[in-house]
Amino acid sequence: MTEHELHPISIRLGDPRITKWNLGDEHGQEVRFFGWHAIKTSQSSSPVPFSVTSAHTDSSLLSLCVQEVFGSFITSILKITDDIGDINIQETPHFRLENSLVTEIVKVFAETRLGSNEDALLCILPTMVPRLRLSFLENAVVAAKRMANQHRRAGEWTQAETVLRWAWEVCKESQPRTRKDDCQIDQPVHVDDPVQQAAIALGELYRWAICDNKTKDFGLHGIAWLSDQKHRHQVPSPSTLDEIIDRYIYVAEKVVQKGDN
């Protein structure tokens, strides 16, 4: 994926000049972009520069034009669609987010030989993503919690833990890395922060587990793992995330004390 900053002249969608751009490199190379149905260009007499992210393709010009028409059709349909459905997790062969509507459109795209599944996603996702009610991280946590609850009710504690830890890692990796001396103690706290929601979901899974003697050790080990995570993020003062984890450490300590008595 490559990001480009474009400096447009006054153009409108549908103008053939919008597809070809001189990127100003030493060779004066022109690049043709597709996917304008997902871009909001300025219609003013003095439009400002804007950025686009592109992926190189070896598809023929004819194929790309057909895909552009298909993408424009999907964009028009979505304008009258209030809800594109829930985001779920596909667990095999590896974790990924999935939407049933996107899956069906990709299937139609491939069956009509408009291109590969990868071509379909490049054509569809730029239009779909802005219509999601939640951010990627929020969708990941919500979907993981839904899947984990299903596993827990089926007695599949390890599978529930695996999917929630996946969401935890996704959220942690997406957090900006801040040095200790750059942290602001008075920075506002967002209670609905995805990583905090992932911590609560894991804590609740382990809390449920320690209520049953059969899964008690699983729950205690899980809370011990959560405790270890406190020391892996560099924050100069106790954070909301620490406070959340401390609640479950307290619960675990009380359970152990009760067992000793």
Image: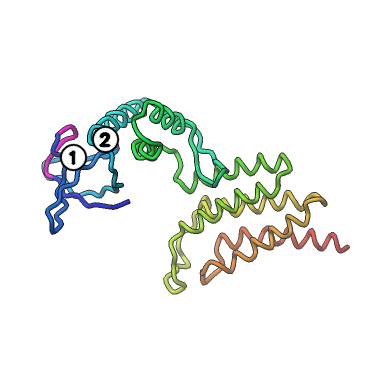
Q: Nearer the viewer, residue 56 or 219?
A: 56
Residue 64, label in figure: 2
**Magenta stretch, residue numbers:** 9-15
Q: Is residue 135 above or below residue 252?
A: above
Category of crowding for the residue at label 2, using alpha-carbon neighbours closer than 10 angstroms: few (below 14), some (14–19), many (at least 20): many
Which kind of residue does numbered mark 1 sit on? Thr
Q: Is residue 200 above or below residue 77?
A: below
The amino acid type, in three-letter code, at marker 2 is: Leu
Q: Is residue 224 magenta?
A: no
Q: Indicate which disc residue 235 carries.
A: none
Give the camera-side residue of 84 and 121.
121
SS category of the residue bearing label 2: helix
Q: Is the stretch drawn in magenta largely helix, strand or loop?
A: loop
Q: Is residue 49 left or right of residue 249?
A: left
Tell me which residue sits at (45%, 29%) in the image: 104
Residue 244 sits in which quadrant? bottom right
Q: Helix or strand or loop: what does disc 1 sit on?
A: loop
The residue located at (38%, 36%) in the rendering is: 116
Q: Are marks 1 and 2 in contact (CB under 8 Å)?
A: no
Residue 117, horizontal then vertical, whole percent: 41, 37
Q: Which mark is residue 19?
A: 1
Residue 219 in the image: above or below residue 11: below
Q: Nearer the viewer, residue 16 or 197?
A: 16
Where residue 236 appears, x then y in whole percent? 51, 72
At 78% from the left and 60% from the top, the residue drawn is 254
- Labels 1 and 2: the sequence-earlier one: 1
The residue carrying pointer 1 sits among few (fewer than 14), some (14 to 19) or many (20 or more) residues within 10 Å by Cα, namely some
C-alpha gap between disc 1 and disc 2: 12 Å
